Amino acid sequence: MTEPLPLFVYGSLLRRTGRREIDALLRRSVRARREARIAARLYDLGPYPAAVLESDGRHQVRGQLLELSHARRTLARLDRYEDQGREFRRERALAVTTASGQRHACWVYTYVRPIAFRPRIARGDYRAHCARRATTARTHGH
């Protein structure tokens, strides 16, 4: 039997989602996390980001590669959380781990709706984007 593919996460699945059952599922299922990146563009949808894969590799999205236990069951539950097929689609991609530079086939949730007029997250790093947004809000008293 082949080893299941890891899952590349770049947004709400990097941290607590606010949904108790999903957070508990990830705490139980994630065996290992590695910093990684994929060739994609990242957009700000407000409460969460959206990645759109690209083939030329000019833009990178930073995130983590998750090794999952009970991968089929975990991914089926995450498919429902990510609204598989209506807003996001789980598809295969190639991730590069940051520390070693190794390439790994993986799953990633990509955005399927039109993305025009959505602000792009220029550096492809949602965690840094959220930190900048929080700093700006504190500085401006929001």
Image: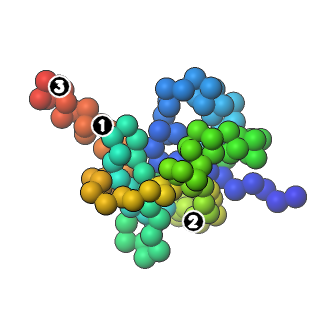
Q: Which residue lies furthest to the left in this view?
A: 140
Q: What residue is pinned by disc 2?
A: 94
30 shown above or below 4: above
Horizontal side of residue 133 vs 112, given as left or right: left
Question: Which element carries disc 3, helix, strand or loop?
Answer: loop
Q: How many marks?
A: 3
Q: Which of marks 2 and 3 is in front?
A: 3
Tell me the amino acid under the disc marked 3.
His
Quadrant where the C terminus is found in the figure: top left
Alpha-carbon span between mark 2 and mark 1: 27 Å
Alpha-carbon span between mark 2 and mark 3: 39 Å
Question: Which element carries disc 1, helix, strand or loop?
Answer: helix
Alpha-carbon span between mark 1 and mark 3: 14 Å
Q: Residue furthest bottom?
A: 56
Q: What residue is pinned by disc 1?
A: 131
56 shown above or below 73: below
Give coordinates of residue 70: x percent, y percent.
Answer: 77, 41
| Image-quadrant location for residue 114 | bottom left
Which residue is found at the position 19% from the left and 30% from the top? 137
Tell me the amino acid under the disc marked 2.
Leu
Which residue is found at the position 60% from the left and 31% from the top? 22
**Badge 3: how crowded within 10 Å, few (<14), some, or many (20+)?**
few
Which residue is found at the position 35% from the left and 53% from the top? 43
Q: Nearer the viewer, mark 1 or mark 3?
A: 3
Give coordinates of residue 34: x percent, y percent.
Answer: 56, 48
Tag 3 or tag 1, which sits nearer the N-term? 1
Tag 1 or tag 2, which sits nearer the N-term? 2
User: Viewer-proximal residue, 33 or 70?
Assistant: 70
| Any part of residue 112 in sight | yes
Question: Which element carries disc 2, helix, strand or loop?
Answer: strand
Q: Do the residues labelled 2 and 3 touch (CB within 8 Å)?
A: no
Q: What residue is pinned by disc 3?
A: 142
